[in-house]
Amino acid sequence: MARIGIIGGEGRMGQAIAALLGETDHEWAGGVDRGEDVARLADGSDVLIDFSSPGALAATLHAAIGAGIPAVIGTTGLSEENHQAIDEAARAVPILQTGNTSLGVTLLAHLVEEAARRLGPDWDIEITEMHHRMKVDAPSGTALLLGEAAARGRGIDLAENSERGRDGQTGARERGTIGFAALRGGTVAGEHSVILAGEQERIALTHHAEDRDIFARGALRAAEWLIGREPGRYTMNDVLAL
């Protein structure tokens, strides 16, 4: 049994995780939100799960290091500075950072990387995603996770080989790039498709999130797995041994 503290406890994901804890043997150590004492929560927890905001990340990492406990970072919209802070924290404690805690999406990314590697740059890759109207960042963290998987498969840098927000006279599609399209509306929990389009054939790898609970279950699985690990930076691939 583990004591699990939640950063962003009043958010959608925080509430979903807290509700699911009642179905497990783990204990809810409490939840905090912006401006509240993260360090105190960390002192009473065995692991932290953060689904808050990029601005709150520094406090979470500082608290985890201070308490000597691991942290699962599921917050999206992270900057390069945020990722550098995670790298530094991971030298002291185990940190698992991911753009999506779904086990299904984790496997999807693995398949996308393999497909991109096998098919090569002659196959165009387009990533589409749709989320609820309240989501504030685009492309989603999951879309970027899938884009990174495709880029790894091709051995390229995603930032230098991506196309976003096409509008007007954009010209022909550049060979080897990875395209993104983001849709927002309604109460969609999350839909992602990776389309690989070749000559006269097309492959679509798709994941539909029917309920936010899938992310909460994955976050709890990640937190369980992370406890007792050596300091370092981990991903959901490590949880599934991919």
Image (cartoon, rainbow, N blue to C red):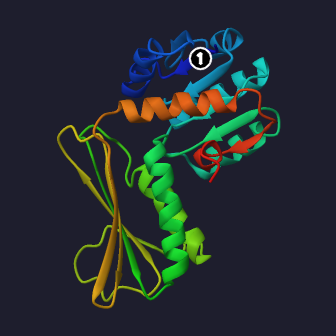
Q: Quadrant location of the N terminus?
A: top right
Number of numbered discs overlaid on the protein picture: 1
Residues 15 and 204: in front is 204
Question: Which residue is at the far left?
Answer: 186
Query: 229 and 24: which one is in front?
Result: 24
Q: Is residue 200 above or below residue 88?
A: below
The residue depicted at 25 percent of the width and 41 percent of the height is: 132
Residue in front for this viewpoint, 64 or 17: 17
Give the quadrant of residue 37. Answer: top right
Residue at 51% over, 69% down:
150
Q: Position of residue 95 (x, y in %)?
A: 69, 36
Neighbor class of circle 1 (other Cα within 10 Å; few <14, some 14-19, many 20+) is many
Q: Position of residue 27 (x, y in %)?
A: 57, 9
Q: Give the residue pinned by disc 1.
A: 4
User: Residue 163, relative to residue 15: is it above or below?
Assistant: below
Left or right of residue 134, residue 6 in this image: right
The answer to whether residue 34 of the structure is visible from this angle is yes
Residue 154 occupies which quadrant of the picture? bottom right
Identify the residue shown where x is 44% and y is 87%: 175
Which image quadrant is residue 40 in? top right
Q: Amino acid at mark 1?
A: Ile
